[in-house]
Amino acid sequence: SQTIHQWPATLVQPVGSPLSLECTVEGTSNPNLYWYRQAAGRGLQLLFYSVGIGQISSEVPQNLSASRPQDRQFILSSKKLLLSDSGFYLCAWSRGFTGELFFGEGSRLTVL
Amino acid sequence: QKEVEQDPGPLSVPEGAIVSLNCTYSNSAFQYFMWYRQYSRKGPELLMYTYSSGNKEDGRFTAQVDKSSKYISLFIRDSQPSDSATYLCAPVNTGFQKLVFGTGTRLLVSP
């Protein structure tokens, strides 16, 4: 069966500090991978998606970046966090272009 | 105009009530209509989906699509406290590469 792991689950970071969130998928190959952010009172905002190693599409211009160094690994990074980066970050995968996404447990980021 | 709009709620109902959750969209190219359920502090999970117009039933849940008015509904019969969650709609067009979600409606079912 397929599983998705995302970590860390919770982190508190000062403004201006770097960020690295990691996501890995097991039990499938060549998945589409996604990073979403869910801010308080707002919906799921798509940040990045990837259809293959090294292929990243960015949806929202901001100080975040994503990388896919391996087929089933997706990393979200920032060099300098802003207060507005606080939120619930969700990694997800899908088999090709279907509407069925499988989400991780999420990483809750608080920037102070 | 946002692509997908939902009333954020919260919608509070007593146990056993029939719940109606709604969503409107603007892109007439959407053909699949997904409903996700998200429990507090968890990632969303796919609840059910429909293709094009019409109804689809799955146990206590019924999804309904009216493409002429660009209106999507999810009905929950005999609602249970375990149904308390946020429900997000996500319409899809063929060939899509990204899924656009509504803001979600928070449902609270009291025993």
Image (tube, grey):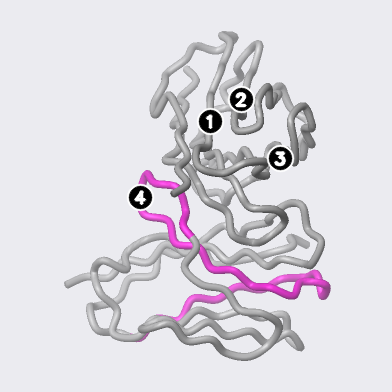
Return the mark for residue A23: 1
Return the mark for residue A75: 2
Quadrant of the image containing the N terminus of chain B: bottom right
Mark 3 or 2, nearer chain start: 3
User: Which amino acid does the dot numbered 4 rest on?
Assistant: Ser
User: Which amino acid does the dot numbered 2 rest on?
Assistant: Ile
Name the spot of residue A106 as percent of width and height, x first: 45, 37
- Label 2 element class: strand
Q: Residues within 10 Å of mark 4 (few under 14, many from 20)?
A: few
- Label 1 element class: strand
- Label 4 element class: loop
Chain letter belonging to callout 2:
A
Closer to us: mark 2 or mark 4?
2
Quadrant of the image containing the C terminus of chain B: bottom left
* Residue for badge 3: A49
Question: Is residue B88 found inside the magenta-colored segment of the image?
Answer: no
Chain letter belonging to callout 4:
B
Q: Quadrant of residue B80?
A: bottom left
